Image: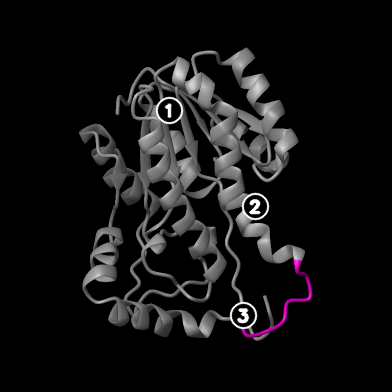
Amino acid sequence: MKLTGRTILITGGSAGIGLAFALEFMELGNQVIITGRRQGILDQVKLRYPKLHTIQSDVANPVEISTLAARVRAEFPKLDVLMNNAGISHYKNLKATASDLAGLTTELNVNVGGVIRMTSAFIDILKANKGSLINVSSALAFVPLPCIPIYCATKAAIHSYTLSLRFQLQETGVDVIELMPPAVKTDMTADLPEGDGIILITTQELVKQSFKALKAGSLEIRPGQSSQLALMSRLAPNFINGQLWKAARKLVPVGAG
């Protein structure tokens, strides 16, 4: 993937992995737009990094996605990279009855629905500009961490969806890339302890490994522990699943979560 001279849109770019990638892309001289749900957080990021373009938009809201797409087409007609990064995770106790049945699918709506809607809303401009699409899934697409079962299921869905995208877009000039991070030290993993098979890496290390792979033209990027987990899921699935369950058991909430 060409890493300079691009116009890049990153969802969920106000913190964590999204912001780390946004800053690296910006340092390379690219024009970078980030989105997020909370205007206040975006304003803080803009104050710290004035060269970043910030637009409030929620990937769970189809109307806001349509508005975002229209604005980006008008203001950034050379957009040629979409990074679907926005995601959420919640601890869940699957043995307990949920009082909020609608809330059970919140992660699906953001992590899967958001990627599908964003991709559809921007596919025409990506094709016109022979661009790149980067979907952020997870090493947990291969092996679940049972304390966040719905999150893991969403990442497995994104992995499958991205494979289909790559086949359907192979004659359009659009590169379809999947980034599969391992556990990364962000606010999302603040409660996740290291050990029992879990190793957390920094966002800086994730960016370093990922950009090396992007520069090499990799379409499926498995930084850090991701390659090991993918291999173990094939060679010794019972062992690795058992190890992750051992690490995750204490994080399962007493109630439905």
Question: Is 100 inside the magenta-drawn segment?
Answer: yes
Secondary structure mainly formed by the magenta segment:
loop
Separation of marks 2 and 3 at Cα, in angstroms:
19 Å
Tell me the residue at 65%/52% (across/down): 109
The numbered mark at residue 202 is none
Q: Label 1 belongs to which residue?
A: 26
Residue 62 % position (x, y): 71, 38
Mark 3 belongs to which amino acid?
A: Asn
Tell me the residue at 54%/13% (across/down): 77
Residue 89 % position (x, y): 57, 62
Tell me the residue at 67%/20% (across/down): 71
Q: Identify the magenta region.
A: 94-101
Quadrant where the image shows the N terminus: top left
Q: Label 2 belongs to which residue?
A: 109
Q: Is residue 227 left or right of residue 202?
A: left
**Earlier sequence position, callout 1 versus callout 2:** 1
Mark 1 belongs to which amino acid?
A: Met
The numbered mark at residue 93 is 3
Q: Is residue 27 left or right of residue 230?
A: right
Q: Secondary structure at mark 3?
A: loop
